[in-house]
Image: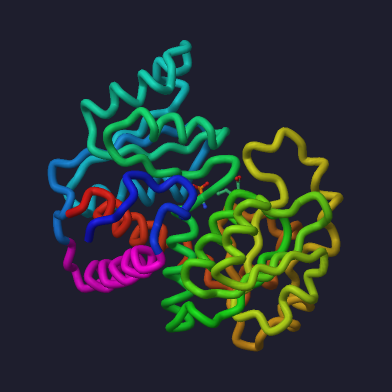
Amino acid sequence: MKLKTKDLLTLNELGNAELVEIIDNAIKMKKDLKKGISKPLLKNKTLAMIFQKPSTRTRVSFETGMFQLGGHALNLSADELQLKRGETIEDTSKTLSRYVDLILARVYSHDEIELLAKNSSIPVMNGLSDSFHPCQTLADLMTIQEKKKKLAGLKLAWIGDGNNVCNSMIYGCAKTGIEISIATPKGYEPNPNVVKESSKLTDVKLSNHPETAVRGADVVVTDTFVSIHHQTTDRTNDFLPHFQVNSSLMKKASPSAIFMHCLPAKRGQEVTSEVIDGPQSVIWDEAENRLHAQKALMVALLRV
Ligand code: CP
Ligand code: NVA
């Protein structure tokens, strides 16, 4: 499989068919792994992982994925690189390009990952910026495909903050034909350019009404009210109690609706324990699928 893009920074870089192919490959790799089959497709390849912010899932799933593919992953805390002492992103990117085959970076500002990608001769993957989280969307779409056996024609409701995870999710829905209805408090809407662009491909509805957004939804998704890059926790009051996913809100979705959350979650805030730990929740499969989706992504980016 040959992707047109060198990098994955937002999810918008992928063509519709490319995205579906990555998801299908991820599902196949997952089935193979469960049967004990793991092909060393990235033998002798090295992934450099730069983390400016904490991570559990992204770091562990990328490192494990690289190991399972026969490659090697280097975990580089931004604090331990010369970046900390003022070396530029441009120079860091050019240096890493001479040693490794692939870069994953979790950054505060999306501009920084754009700069990293612009100056690298190797693929760069966004492991979360203040604006996008494309690797999460790959795993989320894979999970939806597994649970619902299709993507096109489904209805997804996003409740809460129109944040980085939401922006990539909008692109993902648009490219796979999922209708997305987003309910946020006023002032917390997703990126308007993402909404505008995606509206050409699918129905993207924005409102301030969670009950309306979840009506008939096959998938209900939320995320923390306070993302890592926010300096304040005062935001919580703008969301509660109206934008919490609880049992009464879930009852308004389709009876077979699944609940998703990228994690980490704050129980009692964006979601109640009853929902996130309840029978409709698929969060552990969703977290696991980071591993499989990213393996398929790395293989696609390295064109092997
Ligand atoms: N969902 C996600 O990206 O989790 P981490 O912050 O633990 O990597
Ligand atoms: N929106 C969250 C996602 C964490 C994986 C954040 O940016 O902190």
Q: For the point 67% across and 72% down, which residue is it?
A: 275
User: Closest to the observer: 34 or 141?
Assistant: 141
The quarter of the rendered structure image containing the N terminus is: bottom left
Task: Judge from the rendering whether residue 14 lies leftward or rightward of residue 277; answer left or right.
Answer: left
Q: For the point 44% across and 62% down, which residue is it?
A: 139
Q: Is residue 20 magenta?
A: yes
* Residue located farthest toward the front when viewing the structure as drawn: 200
Q: Main secondary structure of the magenta part?
A: helix
Residue 24, placed above or below residue 232: below
Residue 148, placed above or below residue 209: below
Q: For the point 32% across and 68% down, which residue is it?
A: 21
x then y, percent, for residue 148: 48, 82
Task: Specify how the rendered protein is coloured.
Answer: rainbow
| Residue range highlighted in magenta | 16-38
x then y, percent, for residue 94: 30, 23
User: Closest to the observer: 273 or 221?
Assistant: 221
Task: Judge from the rendering whether residue 224 lies leftward or rightward of residue 281; answer left or right.
Answer: right
x then y, percent, for residue 168: 54, 55
Q: Quadrant of residue 261?
A: bottom right
